[in-house]
Image (tube, rainbow, N blue to C red):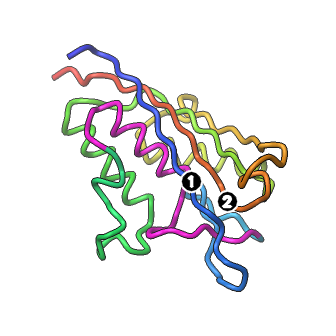
Amino acid sequence: MSGLRIGQGVDVHPFVEPGEHRPLVLCGVTIPGGPGLAGHSDADVGYHAVADALLGAAALGDLGSRFGVDRDDTAGADSAGLLAAVVADVAAAGWRPGNVDVTIVAQRPRLAGHRQAMRDNLARRCHLDVGAVSVKFTTTDHLGALGRGEGVLGLATCLLVAVQG
């Protein structure tokens, strides 16, 4: 086993239908004023993408195979708990996160004012110094479903470091 591994994760969810009330949660931060995302859990695409990146780097499968939408116990789940379980599984496999880089792709709402809170949450959940966590935002310049404001995409890359034991 080499001492470093890189993983990537992707997650996307559509916004809930008009009239449905669900909070928009991204990297553990509730974003006021926007529609929430539809999904089996709380649909936090930031945390989901990071969890998939960690699982992929550790060769432990993916988020769907571990917490699938067919499981009643994960319906409405707080993604912070799912990410915590993934971080624990990765640690049990002999790895620890070295850094996390997240990009949130959304035409709406504006997210820049929430960057530091997202970084703080990810650092805490992944047991990292906040300096090892990057959160970026971009749009698709009105191209495609995301550009039409139909949902949000999360992309994540992580580095895992082997735990010396």
Q: Residue furthest top?
A: 2
Residue 18 covered by magenta stretch: no
Q: Residue furthest bottom?
A: 19
Q: Residue at x 38, y 60 (%)?
A: 81
Report the side of 104 relative to 91 (left or right). right
Q: For this rendering, which residue is in front, 31 or 7? A: 7
Q: Secondary structure at mark 1?
A: strand
Q: For this rendering, which residue is in front, 136 or 84? A: 136
Q: Secondary structure at mark 2?
A: strand
Check contact, mark 2 vs mark 1: CB within 8 A: yes
Q: Residue at x 24, y 44 (%)?
A: 89
Q: Residues within 10 Å of mark 2 (few under 14, many from 20)?
A: many
Write down the residue under mark 1: 12
The amino acid marked with disc number 2 is Gly
Q: For this rendering, which residue is in front, 69 or 22? A: 69
Residue 7 rendering spot, x and y as whole percentages = 41, 30
Q: Using the rendered view, name the quadrant where residue 64 is placed.
A: bottom left
Write down the residue under mark 2: 151
Residue 29 rendering spot, x and y as whole percentages = 61, 59
Q: Using the rendered view, name the quadrant where residue 38 is placed.
A: bottom right
The amino acid marked with disc number 1 is Val
Magenta highlight range: 34-61
Query: Looking at the image, is mark 2 or mark 1 earlier in the sequence?
Result: 1
Q: For this rendering, which residue is in front, 92 or 69? A: 69
Q: Is residue 80 above or below residue 98?
A: below
| Marker disc for residue 86 | none
Residue 164 rendering spot, x and y as whole percentages = 21, 20
Q: Residue at x 78, y 51 (%)?
A: 147
Residue 53 covered by magenta stretch: yes
